[in-house]
Image (cartoon, rainbow, N blue to C red):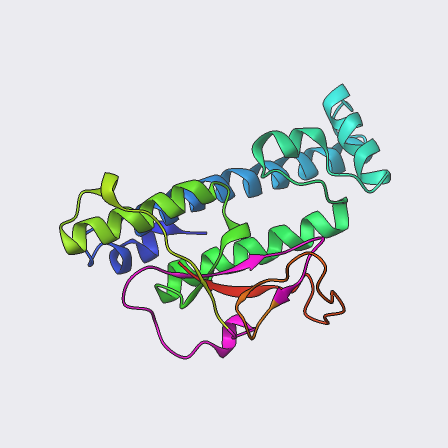
C-alpha cells in the first residue's frame, strides 16, 4: 500500500489523529506483506536449489505443509489463533479495508478487528473529538449503542461525532435487538441472532 499517493487526502483535514493511526497501521501491514513476500521468494529459491535451505526457511516450509502460520510471520504480524488458510483470508480482508480507507477516505463503518492496535484507533477517536469540541481528553469516555443495522454496507450516513464500528462478536449469550441489551440469565436463549456481527456506535 502506497501511503505517499494518498497522503494528501489525509492531510487536508489537518492531520487528524485517525489519519495518523491509519498511517501507522499501513506501515505495519507493509512490513508484514514485504516480509511474507521475501520469505516465500527465498523458500521457492531454496526448493529449486538456487540457495541453501536455512533452518528458518525449513521451519516456514514445515509450517506451510502443516497449514499453520509460520512463527516468523507471527513475529511481525497480528495476534491470531487461526490456521494458515483462514489467517491469509483474514489478512486479505484487513488489507482491503485499510487500502479502501487510505484511497477513498474516511469510511462509514470501521472494522475494529482489522487493526493491529485497536486501542490506538480508539484513542485517536477521543483525540479527534477533543480537538473538535475543545474538551480535555482526560474528561472524555465512550458511550455505546448497538444499532439495528446488520451489515456495514447498509449504513447510509456518516456520524457527526464518534465512529461506527463492526466486527464485535458475542459468545455464550444472545442479544435482544428489541430491548437493545444482552438477554439476562433464565430468559429464553433460543435466538437466531446469537453471536452475530453487529454495528456499534461509539
For residue 42: magenta?
Answer: no
Q: x and y percent of residue 28 in the render? A: 47, 39
The residue positioned 64% from the left and 59% from the top of the image is 184
Q: Is residue 166 above or below residue 158?
A: above
The residue positioned 57% from the left and 72% from the top of the image is 177
On the rendered structure, is 152 left or right of 189? left
Quarter occupied by the C terminus: bottom left
Q: x and y percent of residue 129 in the render? A: 24, 53
Q: Which residues are magenta?
A: 148-175
Residue found farthest to the right: 66
Residue found farthest to the left: 134
Front residue of 5/73: it is: 73
Front residue of 39/156: it is: 156
Q: Main secondary structure of the magenta part?
A: loop
Front residue of 88/167: it is: 167
The residue positioned 33% from the left and 56% from the top of the image is 5
Res. 80 image quadrant: top right
Q: Is residue 190 above or below residue 58?
A: below
Front residue of 30/174: it is: 174
Res. 77 image quadrant: top right
On the rendered structure, is 99 left or right of 3? right
Q: x and y percent of residue 112 in the render? A: 50, 53
Marker count (numbered) = 0
On the rendered structure, is 73 left or right of 112? right
Residue found farthest to the front: 186
Q: x and y percent of residue 61 in the render? A: 80, 33
On the rendered structure, is 88 left or right of 158? right
Amino acid at each position: 500500500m502506497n501511503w505517499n499517493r494518498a497522503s494528501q487526502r489525509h492531510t487536508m483535514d489537518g492531520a487528524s489523529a485517525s489519519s495518523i493511526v491509519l498511517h501507522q497501521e499501513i506501515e505495519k501491514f507493509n512490513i508484514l506483506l514485504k516480509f511474507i513476500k521475501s520469505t516465500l521468494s527465498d523458500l521457492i529459491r531454496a526448493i529449486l536449489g538456487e540457495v541453501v535451505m536455512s533452518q528458518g526457511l525449513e521451519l516456514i516450509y514445515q509450517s506451510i505443509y502443516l497449514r499453520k502460520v509460520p512463527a516468523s510471520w507471527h513475529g511481525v504480524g497480528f495476534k491470531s489463533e487461526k490456521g494458515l488458510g483462514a489467517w491469509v483470508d483474514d489478512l486479505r480482508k484487513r488489507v482491503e479495508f485499510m487500502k479502501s480507507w487510505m484511497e477513498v477516505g474516511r469510511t462509514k463503518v470501521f472494522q475494529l478487528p482489522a487493526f493491529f492496535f485497536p486501542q490506538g484507533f480508539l484513542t485517536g477517536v477521543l483525540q479527534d473529538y477533543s480537538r473538535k469540541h475543545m474538551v480535555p481528553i482526560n474528561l472524555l469516555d465512550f458511550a455505546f449503542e448497538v444499532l439495528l443495522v446488520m451489515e456495514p454496507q447498509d449504513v447510509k450516513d456518516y456520524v457527526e461525532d464518534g465512529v461506527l464500528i463492526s466486527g464485535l462478536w458475542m459468545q455464550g449469550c444472545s442479544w435482544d435487538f428489541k430491548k437493545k441489551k444482552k438477554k439476562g440469565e433464565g430468559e429464553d436463549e433460543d435466538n437466531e441472532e446469537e453471536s452475530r456481527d453487529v454495528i456499534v456506535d461509539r
